[in-house]
Image: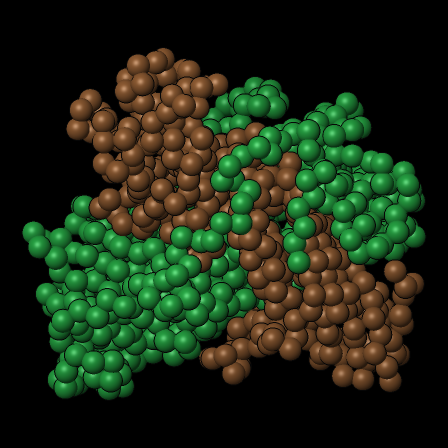
Chain colours: A brown, B green
Amino acid sequence: MAKHSGRGIASINYPIGMNLGGDPSQALVHSNPSGKFTVALSSIDLGQGMKSVTRQICAETLGVPVEDVYVDTADSDTGPHCMGSFASRGTHRVGNAVMAAAKEARGVMMEAAAEELEVNAADLETDGRGNIHVKGAPHRSISTKDVAIAAQFKQGKTISGRGIFLVPLSDVDPETGEMSPATCYAHACLVAEVEVDDETGEVSMVRMDSAYELGRALNPRLVEQQLVGGAWMGISHTLYETPEPYYPDPKHGPRDFVEYLMPGPGDICPHDIAVLERPAADGPFGAKGPGEMCANPVLPAVANAIFNAVGVRIDDLPITPEKVLRAIKAQGGARPQARR
Amino acid sequence: MLELRKDVFADERDDNLKEIGKGTQRQDMLGHVTGTSTYFDDHKLQGMLHLKVVRSTHSHARLRRIDTSEAERSPGVRRIIRGADVPRNLNTLLSLINFGKDDEPSLAVDKVRYKGEPIVAIVADSPRDAYEAMAKVRIDYEPLPAVFDVEDALKPGAPVVNEVYPKNTFTYYETYDHQKLRFGDADRGLASADHVLEQRYQMSPIEHAPTETNGSIAAPDTNGRYVVYTSTQALFFSLDTCAKILDVPSNTFHFIGGTVGGGFGGKVDTLTEPLCILGAMLTGRPVRYQLGREEEMQYGPPRGAERIYIKDGVMRDGRVVARKIRAYFDSGAYTRLSSYAAVKCAAHLPGPYTIPDVYGDIYCVFTNRTPATAMRGFGVTAMDFAIECQMDKLSHLVGMDPMEFRILNAYRDGDMKAHRREAKNTALIECVQVAAEKAKWPIREEFKRMSSRKDGGGSRAAVPPTPREPHKQPVTASQQRITYDRAPAATREPPPPTPTPPPPSPPAPSHGATRFSSVFGTRRR
């Protein structure tokens, strides 16, 4: 009786946005008289950071500090239509809509600034700190606040913009499945190291190393939150979770978190992540979306690591100690594979 | 720990941005860490009533009689809602995008199709009053045989779960009981392979387990409108679904959401809003309806189970030459979103690899269990589990390192994917290389030098000759008529007279996908 360690890998890709497209999102951006901007959306922040990512996209596009932008979400009276927060579409679809709206608003802002500075708008640039100045002549400058005041009370202009992003709906050929499902894909590869107890069938996580390619990490801390949390959801899916433990027999379903198994703090392991950025041609600043795909490589990587450790293949999820132990017994004991 | 590998694909990016790429603290952080962010349930309104539903205790049963007379007299009960009170008591979520047929009632009328299906809603002064009244509802069930296994459900003589789909499968393009993917000749590919490996994979359902369970609060507003605070993941999706079910113009509603205590796909189904608003309409008072933990876990929709069969052909040198997949999505008793995920799953085949011959049949199957819905990685998570376990077995079979095996088979820029679009912006090889480096997993030099940007396209860009299967005629309209809660239409219209056989249709051009409805999917009826 012993504990055996093993390593397994999996590599995956994941489509960004609703399958086949046809899922628009809209955004409205406008400035108040002090040059502070509001982004109005009907999109939902599920805790993944939609508000923060769209805020950064808006600030970058306008050329103002992020503190000067506030994102207001999820009100059907004030926010224009959005298909919803699902299908890894938030960053890509909503981000693009916000970018388009911010571009239009920036156009008005630069025109208004040009009128105040008595120059051509094409000769102006933003410094990202709340000022607009003539290229190569930073002293000929005006603050975005003064531009907003002038635009509103003197010039009669609205510094605002509308944006929509739509990937046109694709047909599907019923005979071959020919279709355009998505415009870009995120990628990942994950190595899982486990320890399997051949007496109890229990699997413990030792560590994970991974590489995720996401187009552009718009906010690396939010990306880290998604990838770390998502990988743990993957572990939980692999080793613990189901509301139907005897599927397809529906009996004995758990009713609360005492009966529904999930990993606790003591079951977590180090996870070392590398983020690669290959910008998507139609992503906002190249971004794709990390939200959904992060759990996917974990399930097979752990299953493959279990095989490497004890030589059994468990092809039914979740991989419970009972299944592992039965498989080890069926093959007459653990058969560790070549150490990787 | 997270490291940004700026060295990879550096020539494809401008890294001189001011706000993008910074780990700026989230806008709503202060509210979250101080417990002041507003969730739907923080709107405690004056005179608010509480709604609870009586759920089926059977997986499949005819409803002989529903007696609510005692419950109506129960203290604190303001209103009992039955199926007949719901203006349009039949809906399917994706009718908003014209996909699929209305197949699910808000409240069951003649039949229940899964254990936990809502039958009666009770609106009362307090949750306790509602629970007390629930115990007084008398329902006379006539149990029917139930089916729980996806493959059993497809057998002749299996109990019909949902009369809208009498064969227990979703109907694709008004013709097929599954979504097809055909690319090349997989049978020929398998015949020419050095090894063939066929395996079965199974994923059980999985619960989203959000901290905040599904719920909403609806209240009469001024000028005949209703304000709705909701935990939805898709504000307008839920709003438009409610407008349809309650048969009112969409601007009757002011939906407010935004801060959600975990979604993961489990808050797209608009589970609570329609009855909640109807409760407010019928009582003139604010109404709150939130699922309890047991309801969320057992009767709220889970990630659906999937059963997957993969048959692969591989050469001794490690090239996968053919992949044939048959998968069954367990949709539960109603469609919700599984039908759409099956299409996404077909598009995902054969995984991020370039395989010359690929064949896929994806079924969306109805069984007598809680309807399944979207969850993080929808349509892909289970398939990735199956494909990547299979890739590991294949590498083992040919005696190749699993990392190198994946790099060898990885798709590259310019390759033709099985759904017949060119692969662009690929990065699987680089992910494997960087993961190997991080894990100190040795791979050979030639595999370290391979790139997603090199050696793709060319002969790999071609659509291979694909055998055409006999084209199946669309099923006659009589089979498609909605017969909700009635016996299926007794007589089937005779088939139309056989017309003069048309000349064999020329092979469809590669880019001329058949347009099969004004939008797509099966036409709504």
Q: Nearer the viewer, residue A130 or B421?
A: A130
Q: Quadrant of the C terminus of chain A?
A: bottom right
Whether residue A216 sits left or right of residue B127 in the image: it is right
Q: Residue at x 35, y 37 (%)?
A: A26
Q: Nearer the viewer, residue A250 or B297?
A: B297
Res. B291 visible in picture: yes
Residue found at the very far left of the displayed protein:
B223
Q: Nearer the viewer, residue A107 or A171?
A: A107
Question: Which quarter of the figure has residue A31?
Answer: top left
Q: Position of residue A15 (x, y in %)?
A: 57, 42
Q: Quadrant of the N terminus of chain A?
A: bottom right
Q: Position of residue A316 (x, y in %)?
A: 68, 67
Q: Is residue B397 above or below residue B515?
A: below
Res. B180 visible in picture: no
Question: Which quarter of the figure has residue B511?
Answer: top right
Q: Position of residue A225 (x, y in %)?
A: 55, 57
Q: Residue at x 69, y 69 (%)?
A: A269
Q: Is residue A263 above or below residue B456?
A: below
